[in-house]
Image (cartoon, rainbow, N blue to C red):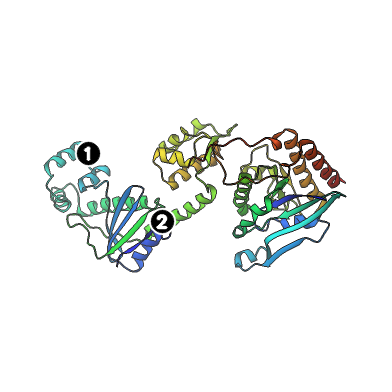
Amino acid sequence: MALKGDLRSFSIVQLLNLIHLARKSGRLSIAAEGEVAELYFQDGKLVYASLRSRPQSLLDVLYQARRLPAKQYKAFKARTQKLNDKALGLLLVNAGYFTPQEILAILRDHYTNIVRKLFTWIEGRFVFESGVPMPKDRIPVRLGLGNLIIEGSRQLREWERLREEIPDLNMALKFVDQPQTDVKSLNLSVEEWRVIAYVNPKNSLRKIARTLKLNDLEIRRIAYALIQAGIVELVRPEDYRPKRVLQHAFVNRSKEESISLVQRIINRISR
Amino acid sequence: MQAVKIVVTGPFSAGKTQFIKTVSEIDVVATERKITAEEERTIKESTTVAMDFGRLTIDDDLVLYLFGTPGQKRFDFMWEILSEGMLGFIVLVDSTRPETFREARSILETFKAYAPTPFVVAANKQDLPDAWDVEDLRIALRLPKDVKIVPCVAVDQESVKQVLLELLYSILEWIESGEAHRKPKEMPSSNE
């Protein structure tokens, strides 16, 4: 029977832990953020990983890892179109471009990066189908899950902390009136600069995330870094309407009555 | 007889019950229960689960009630009930426990969101050697310069009175500025 569920109630780290401890074999498919990831396991070890929207051949992976120059990549691509990964790997090894160990190490890094990406997925659906083998034309690796689980747990703690710091994505960012830091002097990432471009009390963090295609974790992480750097502060968006605003004590009193009432309390306490 | 209230809020073990006890003319009606969580019990034996309730007679026609909110998050459903119709609120922070500052800020943001009344932050336990300086607290709590942070020792009546007075001065300024009687703007619907 397939294991199915929701990432909110069972996180990716918990899933990996289950597969690791129960030494499961099969395919874990996770659908989130308009993307589907497929991870294949053999006896509790990761053997293959891919993102459905970006299927990558061995050649693409080697090129992305900067182990093949563009010219060579194009030449191989044109000549080896009909070869699957296993055959291509064999060809590259026999031609002396790579050792088998090098190819496996590059693939391990590639699959690890896919799993790392999944740690940022907070909402989504998963299904684990026991016994489904990995695609035959791909090269398997055997990657223990221990380190990934530890890394994922750290990220999960970071996520929980960020959620406490920025509990509501309906909040907006505003530049602080007197920044202690000069923005130009900071080494900001491209993503941080992109968020800065949208800093405005009119834009909720949710809107910014949607525009820049950032997930909940990424927008919180960037907002938190910018807040900590003293560049921006968290404010209610201009068009924010709370569910309910409580009435204060002066709603049914005139201004003069209110002033008199407060003065009486001040006089009493000052005594 | 008119009755008005001020709400005293803040994280678990900030000293809210003591703060109210120090100025209340009646024995504080406290709804405390023994703490079961081991970690929290190392900090104090019992905690407020519904509210603390103190009273201060102002004159023949006016009485001020002080309501203390429960500090533990699982009782936060009480916050809104206690805050309806308040004059303003005090966020009490234990200046010696930086691990509670984030919680204090979160409580402050929650109250600010549903109660458009003045507030002050009271930096409690300033008599202890490990107490954070008020200006350091301002940075840690990310409070702008216009938010009052009042040094406080909740067991000292004069100190507690000073906190109440600072809040009342803020309330007075708020009324005099006309802000308290401004009709809320028609808000467009939420962007969600």
Q: Residue under label 2, please give it.
A: A152
Image coords of residue A182 (percent x, y): 53, 31
Image coords of residue A208 (percent x, y): 45, 38
Image coords of residue A82 (percent x, y): 11, 47
Q: Is residue B21 left or right of residue A14?
A: right
Q: Is residue A22 left or right of residue B23?
A: left
Q: Residue under label 1, please give it.
A: A69
Above-or-below relation of B139 to A138: above
Q: Secondary structure at mark 1?
A: loop
Camera-nearest label, 2 or 1: 2
Q: Quadrant of residue B150?
A: top right
Count neighbours of disc 1 (C-alpha within 10 A) and say few if under 14, some if 14 to 19, many if 20 or more.
few
How far apart marks 2 and 1 lie (CA) works out to 33 Å
Labels 2 & 1 near each other (Cβ < 8 A): no
Q: Amino acid at mark 2?
A: Gly
Q: Chain of mark 2?
A: A
Q: Chain of mark 1?
A: A
Q: Is residue A153 left or right of residue B90?
A: left
Name which residue lies at 74% across and 39% down.
Answer: B170
Which corner quadrant holds the N terminus of chain A? Answer: bottom left
Depth check, front residue: B187 or A117 = B187
